[in-house]
Image (cartoon, rainbow, N blue to C red):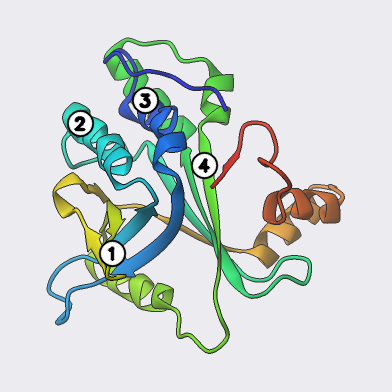
């Protein structure tokens, strides 16, 4: 994956997804939270093995753009379903939205390399046990209700509890929800051989395909 150090001359998403701190932070899980009475937007938390590095990563975005993503240049996608006989689960994918990032770059007077946008991708596959009710369903309802959510770093404490650092969160108004079946059907309509592509996407080996970091 191409790494970039943000010097303030590129849209925030390029520095965020291209940061070397993803390697240090080690994204190991995803969690969802919501207000007990539904009075506030829900939270999607990224759990990092190295809490300090995760906080620094989000802190860099906040330092550049505040707690907002006004161009919605950071694309968040959740893909649900079983792939190739896998257990039920979902894939969380973060990427640079090409159109939005280009729009921001144009506003900044910056020319972007299209190949660099393609490389700005990070994903984490989560398996969901059959006997555990998914928090994702509640997150979806709360997101639909409020029209936004907070993407924030999470620290796993010694007692097993999770601490969400909302001050370093990014308010998002867009998220994509897809299913494995939708992706497979689209690939088939476009004439692709589905099995090897699905295997590459959902059952990565080693560090995954070039341009995609599997955490």
User: Residue at coordinates 35% horizontally, 45% vertically from top-left?
Assistant: 50
Q: Is residue 183 left or right of residue 99?
A: right
How far is disc 4 from disc 2 in space, using C-alphas? 20 Å
Does residue 135 lie above or below 131 as drawn?
above
- Mark 1 is surrounded, within 10 Å at the Cα level, by few (under 14), some (14 to 19) or many (20 or more) other residues, namely few
Residue 32: image location, x then y, percent: 34, 68
SS type, badge 3:
helix
**Residue 214 on image: x %, y %:** 58, 45
Which quadrant, please, contains the N terminus?
A: top right
Between the C-alphas of marks 1 and 3, the distance is 31 Å
Identify the mark nearer the N-term, 1 or 2: 2
In this view of the protein, which residue sits in the foreground, 186 or 74? 74
Residue matched to label 3: 15
Q: CA distance from mark 4 to mark 1?
A: 27 Å
Nearest to N terminus: mark 4 or mark 1: 4
Q: Nearer the viewer, mark 1 or mark 2?
A: 1
Which residue is labeled 2 in the image? 65
Name, please, the residue furthest toward the front.
Answer: 158
Q: Residue at x 42, y 36 (%)?
A: 24
Residue at image coords 33%, 18%: 6
Residue position marked by numbered label 4 in the rendering: 122
Q: Tag 4: Cα neighbours inside 10 Å, few (<14), some, or many (≥20)?
A: many
Nearer to us of marks 2 and 3 is: 3
- Residue situated in front as seen by the camera: 16 or 140: 16
Give above or below for 125 relative to 118: below
Residue denoted by label 1: 158
Which is more foreground, mark 1 or mark 3? 1
Q: Locate residue 68 relative to residue 18 in the image: left or right.
A: left
In this view, 133 is above or below 84:
below
Under circle 4, the secondary element is strand
Q: Earlier in the sequence, mark 4 or mark 2?
A: 2
């Amino acid at each position: 994956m191409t790494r970039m150090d943000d010097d303030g001359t590129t849209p925030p998403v390029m520095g965020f997804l291209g940061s070397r701190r993803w390697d240090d932070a080690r994204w190991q899980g995803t969690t969802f939270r919501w207000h007990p009475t539904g009075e506030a937007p829900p939270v999607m938390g990224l759990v990092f093995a190295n809490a300090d590095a995760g906080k620094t990563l989000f802190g860099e975005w906040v330092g550049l753009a505040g707690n907002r993503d006004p161009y919605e240049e950071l694309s968040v996608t959740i893909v649900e379903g079983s792939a190739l006989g896998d257990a039920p689960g979902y894939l969380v994918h973060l990427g640079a939205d090409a159109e939005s990032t280009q729009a921001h770059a144009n506003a900044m007077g910056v020319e972007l390399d299209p190949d660099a946008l393609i490389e700005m991708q990070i994903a984490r596959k989560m398996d969901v046990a059959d006997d555990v009710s998914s928090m994702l369903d509640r997150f979806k309802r709360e997101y639909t209700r409020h029209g936004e959510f907070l993407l924030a770093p999470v620290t796993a404490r010694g007692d097993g509890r999770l601490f969400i650092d909302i001050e370093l969160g990014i308010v998002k108004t867009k998220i994509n929800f897809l299913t494995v079946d939708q992706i497979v059907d689209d690939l088939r309509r476009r004439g692709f051989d589905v099995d090897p592509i699905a295997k590459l996407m959902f059952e990565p080996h080693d560090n995954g395909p070039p341009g995609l970091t599997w955490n």
